[in-house]
Amino acid sequence: MTDTQSPPLFLTLADDSWQRAYHAFVLAAGALALEREVVLFAGGKSVLALTRTADRLQDQPAEEEMRRKALPTLLELRTACLDLGMRLLACESGMRLAGLSPDDLCESVEVGGVVEFLVQAGTRPITAL
């Protein structure tokens, strides 16, 4: 990072809320559009947002509703963020809690722990959603 670049955005999720996961990907897309690096750590049941279908998140609107409102779905946002270089880290403990294996996760998701995420963040701020 040079002096003129913005610092990376470090995000963390902790529950299975569709709203929180969606907003995390909205924030990530904005930061990535501004050429900021983004790392998201999904802990607890928020790892469900990193599964191939993300269909076990709570209070998820119907895909048809999102289309009627001309909004991207969570999966479309997530794909766009990954295409722009976002890093996704799924918590090992959260995966056990949710009954997931690495095969349940979408491509490009790294499996790790909170210590790995904190080491990556260093002394930079972490935004919890």
Image (spheres, rainbow, N blue to C red):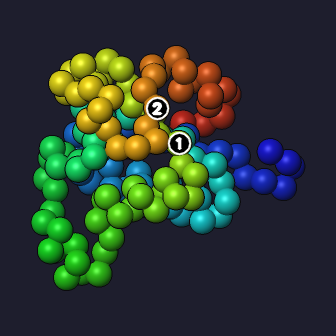
Looking at the image, residue 15 sits to the left or right of residue 89; the answer is left
Residue bearing the label numbered 1: 87
Task: Kindly identify the residue that appears in the image at 15 percent across and 44 percent down.
Answer: 56
Residue at the image point whose x is 15% and y is 63% from the top: 61
Q: Crowding near pointer 2: few (<14 within 10 Å), some, many (20+)?
A: some
Q: Is residue 15 visible?
A: no
User: Looking at the rendering, in which quadrant would you find the N terminus?
Assistant: top right
Around disc 1, counting alpha carbons within 10 Å, would you say few (fewer than 14), some (14 to 19), or many (20 or more)?
some
Q: From this viewpoint, which residue is outermost toward the front?
A: 103
Q: Circles 1 and 2: CB distance less than 8 Å?
A: yes
Residue 30 vertical placement versus 43 (above, below)? below
Residue tagged by mark 2? 110
x then y, percent, for residue 106: 35, 44
Sequence-wise, the earlier of marks 1 and 2 is 1
Q: Is residue 118 visible?
A: yes
Residue 16 vs residue 95, the one in the foreground: 95
Q: Residue placed at 23% from the left, 48% from the top? A: 54
**Numbered disc 2: secondary structure:** strand
